[in-house]
Amino acid sequence: MAEQTNEDLKKEWLYNAVLDIKKNANTESDLNDLIRQLKELVPYRDSEALLQEVENTLKLEHSYQAALEAEAHFQADYEADDYDEDDLKELISSFEVLGQYKDAADYAAKAQKLLDDMHAAQKKKKTTKIIVVAAVLVVSAVLFFYEMQTSRNEFDEMLSKAEQGDILIQHQLGDMYYNGEGVQVNYKEAVRWYRKAAEQGHAQAQYKLGEMYYNNQGVEKGIPQAVEWYRKAAEQGHAQAQYKLGGSYYNGWGVTRDYKQALKWYRKAARRGNAEAQTAVGNIFYNGTGVRRDYAQAIFWYSQAAEQGYSWAQYYLGNMYRNGLGTTKDLPRARELYQKAAEQGHLGAMRALEHIRGL
């Protein structure tokens, strides 16, 4: 009985000490220390609720630090042409986090004006672009032709329409020759039809043509040509092409190595949900490649990709939790992430599981 009472007194003393520290905790280090102590107290009294509160505060602190970073970058490297609509919206959100801190409100107004000017310019454009309906029609048409056995007359009719400039059928024929659907696989013919559609602005055809140049399929291998077709598709918002273009700049493939451009294109693809690009952005911030090292940003992007089941992101995020980088050290969480990656055959995750099995 006395032993239990002493344990309760010890917890009560630690609980009160935590409350005192909490009043003055205002740095990431303070908050991480609080989290560690509160985990020792759970489930004593309302320590679990306090833990959630402190963890939420730490998340806000990460958001605040990321906003400060965005403001500093905007001040140092501001060039209007470097920002597209998504960049500006992200900047405005960051400045809103900062509120009235220093010149944040002025920078928010400047970013908003850039966005307004961009919208005004877009309304004046008269050039016709391929819209989402066209993409839906392409998918529907491809499925249609995949599900039926095309007769010779029907195929001849397709060829006739494609020769007359039907961009959707040109792309379809490229896919058919590439995949051997209804015809024999013929990469040269695939290149021919992809090129016709790509030259008319079809984003997927541009991306596929870039891939064929990159992989030496039906055309002589040409990395610079691949990059240019990736660029054309990327500028239309094609996420995978944006990822490939980012990789070209990161590695110096077909272009001069440029980490700023690599991050720009990786982030465009990442915002569109591309898990490979999200992981690449995480790696850039983790390693501090061309930017200041930022573990909070790395965790954010790794988490986005890990939630989609991407094994490399699960592995990298597991490393962050295993080593307490940018977050509280959490071996159970690391083990969970490694397990998910290992189940997909990730060798690094398998080895990591072995290393922490007894911890």
Image (tube, helix red, strand yellow):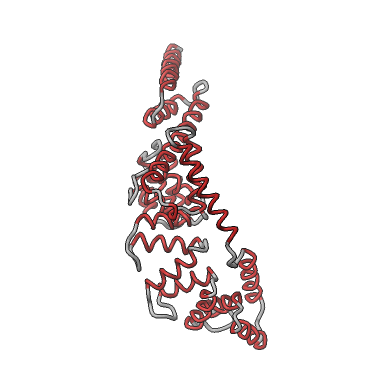
Q: Residue at x 48, y 26 (%)?
A: 42
Query: Which residue is nearer to you in this view: 296 or 146?
Result: 296
Residue 178, x across and y down, in percent: 51, 77
Q: Is residue 159 left or right of residue 68?
A: right
Left or right: residue 338 compared with residue 118: left
How many numbered markers are drawn? Answer: 0
Q: Quadrant of residue 173?
A: bottom right
Q: Is residue 2 visible?
A: yes
**Residue 203 on image: x %, y %:** 53, 68
Placement of the C terminus among the 4 image quadrants: top left
In the picture provided, is 115 more to the left or to the right than 283?
right
Q: Give the answer, above or below, for where 332 lies relative to 304.
A: above
At a point 42% along the width and 15% down the height, the residue shown is 13
Please identify the quarter of the rendering in which residue 71 is found: top left
Q: Position of residue 89 (x, y in %)?
A: 52, 47
Residue 30, position as x, y percentages in the image: 38, 27
Foreground of the two, 226 or 139: 226
Up the image or down, 280 lies above or below 15; here it is below
Q: Residue furthest top?
A: 2
